Image (cartoon, rainbow, N blue to C red):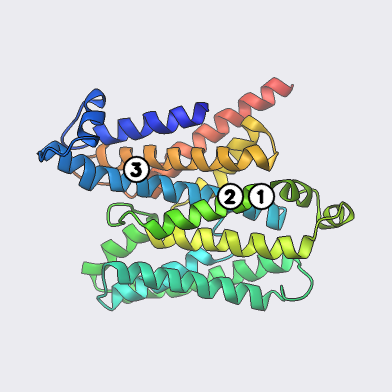
Amino acid sequence: MVLLVVVILTGLIALSLGSIHISVFEIPGHLFTSIDSIENRIINEVRLPRILSGFCVGGLLALAGCLMQVLLRNPLAEPYILGVSGGASAFALIAIFLGISGNWVNLSAFTGAILTILLVFYLSGARGNWNPLKTLLTGVVLAAGWGAIISFLLTISPETRVHGMLFWLMGDLSLGEFSIFSVFILVVSFFACLFFAKELNLLALGQLAAQSLGVSADKLTYIIYFLSSLLTATAVMQAGSIGFIGLIVPHLSRLCVGSDHRILIPVSVLTGGSLLVISDSLARTIMAPHQLPVGILTAMLGVPVFLILLNAVNNKRT
């Protein structure tokens, strides 16, 4: 309930920030009126879609991070660890290099992400016995390969296109539009994860422990793999590669509310969405009229907050 209030306050503050400042107390009046004015257009056509897009992407990455850490049983696991971001970035940069723009770049990124998901699944031998270590190594190797392709594209691309490529690689919401598809993926995945929350708690203890307690570990593993990969692919398609949300937010949430996924999942989604909205608001205002890639701000905000909270928890335990 506290996080829901935080989400609303974050949204109102983000709506008020910009080159034209609008009082927080005036925001509800602009949202629920049909009067044609500059302020109404700025809020309803520019800022609100971007804020909704940012919240959705943050929720997608945070939920994907939760699932990936259970899947690989690795606290350092994050949504991009299996190379999904590398595949999406490589295909998006190929599209930009060829002069393609708009939604075609997003479609290319989504295609690259899905291709990487299938490659990791096939090459890691996941069709048989699931091996988290082999899956992780396969994803890391593929990520390195995609990284080489990305470096090659940046080297041979004309200077007029390199700037846009770098913004995409660092994560940027300025060109992304609010997507009903992204909302659909987030909502469906969210309720699916809540449905399997008890099984996720058991799987986090280990595959053998989960099986001994009646969980179909192999089936659940496949579901988690494809859900987390689809969440990551959708987020990358929407906003490029935004780091730290999928790694920092699940840990931050565990430190605050524990490891019960029935609580951890909604807390992570709300926290991830709020953190990305705050970061994007700062990215577009802190050096106005210039806009920074939001991925820079997520790192600058997420890392110190996480370290401070981790230190406070350690001091409390000691």
Q: Left of 183 or right of it: where is 209?
A: right
Judge whether 195 appears above or below 90 on screen. above
* Label 2 with label 3: CB-CB less than 8 Å: no
- Name the N-terminal-most of marks 2 and 3: 2
At 63% from the left edge and 39% from the top edge, which residue is drawn? 264
Q: Amino acid at mark 2?
A: Phe
Q: Which mark is residue 54?
A: none
Task: Give yes or no for contact between labels 3 and 1 (Cβ–Cβ under 8 Å).
Answer: no
Q: Amino acid at mark 1?
A: Phe
Residue 226: quarter of image: bottom right
Left or right, residue 49 beside residue 198: left
User: Which residue position is annotated with label 3?
Assistant: 280
Question: Which residue in the structure is indicated by mark 1?
Answer: 195
Of the image marks 3 and 1, the number of the one nearer the N terminus:
1
- Say whether marks 1 and 2 touch (CB < 8 Å): yes
Residue 209: x percent and y percent? 86, 52
Rate crowding at label 2 as few (under 14), some (14 to 19) or many (20 or more) other CA atoms within 10 Å: few
Q: Foreground: 68 or 76?
A: 68
